[in-house]
Amino acid sequence: MKKVAVLGFGVIGTGVCKLLTESSSIAVLKYICDLRDIPGLPYGDKHIKDFNIVLNDPEIDAVIEVTGAKRAAYERSLEAIKAKKSVITSNKEVVAEYGVELLQAARENGVSYLFEAAVGGAIPLIRTLRTSLDTDEITRICGILNGTTNYILTKMKENGETYDDALLDAQKLGYAEPDPSADVKGLDTCRKTSILSAFIDGGLIPPAEIDTTGIDNTPDCALTLAAALGGKIKLLGVAEKTPDGNGVSAKVAPCFIPENNVLYAVDDVYNAVLIKCKNSGDVLLYGRGAGAIPTAAAIMSDINEALYGKTSELVWRRAENKTAAGKKRKAFVITKGVPDGINEFRIIKECTADKSHGYIIEDASGIEKLGSDIIAVYDVL
């Protein structure tokens, strides 16, 4: 049986080692490479600190990179690829920042660089895009890509909790980190959206170029008003072809989801991604987007493909984030009272709650002229 090394023994690394040693007929775990001393490590005989041992061992066919680092993880991945070893990762930050270079290096060295677990956890999203829909024309990818923020927004709506209370609840349950910034400020969703953008036309939009708004400034009244207007607020990552077809636009922001949209019912810690294709129509993928074992399961599928299957090659390039010029922007607008000038916009629905007003308007172009009367503006999906 072929042999692999795991680089990093955190939450995900622990899950991968568990599956490899307890229930796998795919590969043998030979090394766990981690610079730390790990007292009580259940696989102590496999623990090493020198990555060169992995690089120089001809028995190692694949490296599973789950360190959570950025630059160092990129460098170790590149070294492994140049040593003719496939690399499997769950590290979305590395894929978003260096995926173009690592995929090219993998092609040049006749090995695989796979990252199913980087977006969507156990949801078979990347493989679907890479193998099942690769002959179709994908025009839009839109999804709830972060379970932590979806849990917080669900509790705010269902239980009437404030943002701070819902966040504290998520932290107590282990859904949110002590420092939740990457989740609640949208950075995690941004990196995932960056990766997904490359499946539209091969151009990866770097995270730094994606306009990103998180949920940390969500007013408590937003969930109440949205519900009154037949919708929910969800943090979405969206990448889509521009109307003129000259590129791809990408954005991360909380949006208003009407009750007739399939993403409306996706609550709690679940993720869902809606893929719009020219020929296949709408394809919806749904499931748990995080957790040690679900993520490790996605990594196991990549290990199996890298060692025994034929991997379809991805050819990516870096791309600019194109703006969708001239596109109407249907929006959910929250205001203080009834502002002067609101009737200049075509109002579809409106409601009032807690001295705030909510409006669904046909086109939000020029809405900024309402000035300080605006509390928040959300795109309508």
Image: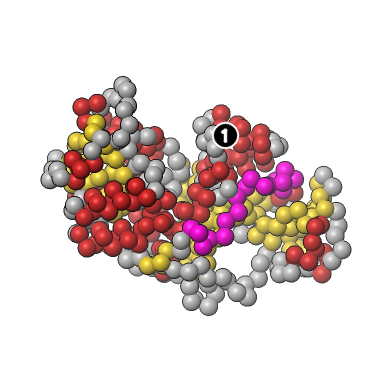
Quarter in which the N terminus is drawn: top left
Q: Residue at x 60, y 31 (%)?
A: 169
In the picture provided, is 6 more to the left or to the right than 68? left
Q: Is residue 214 magenta?
A: yes
Residue corresponding to mark 1:
170
Q: Amino acid at mark 1?
A: Ala
Q: Residue at x 62, y 47 (%)?
A: 215
In the picture provided, is 44 more to the left or to the right than 319? left
Quarter in which the C terminus is drawn: bottom right
Measured from the top left, where is residue 285 in percent x and y?
45, 51
Visible residue check, residue 304: no
In the picture provided, is 98 more to the left or to the right than 216? left
Q: Residue at x 57, y 56 (%)?
A: 212
The residue lying toward the viewer, choosing from 55 and 65, is: 55
Furthest-top residue in view? 40
The residue lying toward the viewer, choosing from 256 and 61, is: 61
In the picture provided, is 130 more to the left or to the right than 278? left
Corner quadrant of residue 165? top right
